[in-house]
Image (cartoon, rainbow, N blue to C red):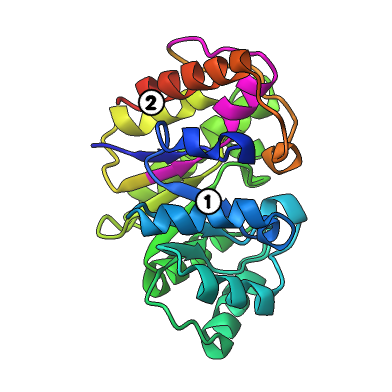
Amino acid sequence: MEIRVSHETPISILPDSFSYNDYCYALVHLFETHPTYYSQFEMALNEGRDVYLDNRIFELGESFDMNRYEYWINKLKPTLYIVPDVLESRYETIEKHKQWTDQNTIKHDCLQMGVVQGETWTDLVKCYNYMSDNVDVIAISFDYSYYITTGYGNNKLTLFSTGRQRFIQQLIQEGIWNWSKPHHLLGCSLAKEFSYYIDDNIYNIKSIDTSNPIIAGLHGYRYMSDQGLRHKPKTLLADMIDATVSDDQLEDIKYNTNKFKQIIGR
């Protein structure tokens, strides 16, 4: 199996990201304030590259304004976009998807990604089943609070990593996992998490996005060859989107992205 990966990247080195990203991952709220950022993704599409558009709930705490989101989807015409959702709420996420489906006027035939949301196993499964029936790609996030009680380890980063592994494994064991539909893993706490899915041949995990190797490089950290970092810099990539990247930082970024691919068996 091969998992496609994309790492969100500062504007100043977005052209360099084409060398280490398998597809482009855009943060929609930055289109409003950074025209150059938007134009890079427009160019990528024109060159035949895939572009995923994120509603930026992770950075904003809530999905981007639905009318503006619709505007940018119609303007950019991305390969795929993440449907508006609500953090850790199964009911509101499903209602949000229904509202979006009823009201949006997307003129371009692009794929929909739906994020599984919920606080409990029951809610997460109900949301998973809904997304399985209603979207093209199912996304599972790295930081559900549910993982804190189901993961194992002695710190939050490890609990998140093992919690997502156990959640996916339980979906498979209980016959809930939809093997006929592609899955996307949103973000990561520790890069070493992903080797698990390769080793277990969960072949329909098709893509990952994470800025982890980029932020590590910007802070001067280099990955260990088999697992990445044992810690996670707290900075959000969106807060460093205007960063001026030095030659040394760029070398660290390229080193880390190469190591990340090794972790996922590339």
Q: Which quarter of the image is occupied by the C terminus?
A: top left
Name the residue: 66% across, 22% down. Answer: 218
Cα separation, mark 2 vs mark 1, equals: 23 Å
Can residue 136 be seen in the rendering of this structure? yes
Label 2 neighbourhood size at 10 Å, few (<14), some (14-19), many (20+)?
Answer: some
In the image, what residue occupies the spot 50% across and 10% down?
224
Identify residue for label 1: 40
Q: Is residue 249 magenta?
A: no
Q: Position of residue 248 (x, y in %)?
A: 61, 13
Image marks 2 and 1: residues in contact by CB distance under 8 Å: no
Residues packed near mark 1 inside 10 Å, few (<14), some (14 to 19) or many (20 plus): some
Q: Is residue 119 visible?
A: no
Please count the marks in the image: 2
Which segment did they paint magenta?
207-225
Q: Quadrant of the N terminus?
A: top left
In the rendered image, residue 139, in percent from the top left (x then y), is placed at 47, 55
| Most foreground residue, 134 or 254 | 254
Mark 2 residue type: Lys
Circle 2 is placed at which residue position?
A: 261
Q: Is residue 129 placed above or below 182 in the rendered structure?
A: below
**Foreground pick, 143 / 82:** 82
Up-down: is 266 above or below 115? Answer: above
Camera-side residue of 265 and 72 = 72
Is residue 211 one of those drawn in magenta?
yes
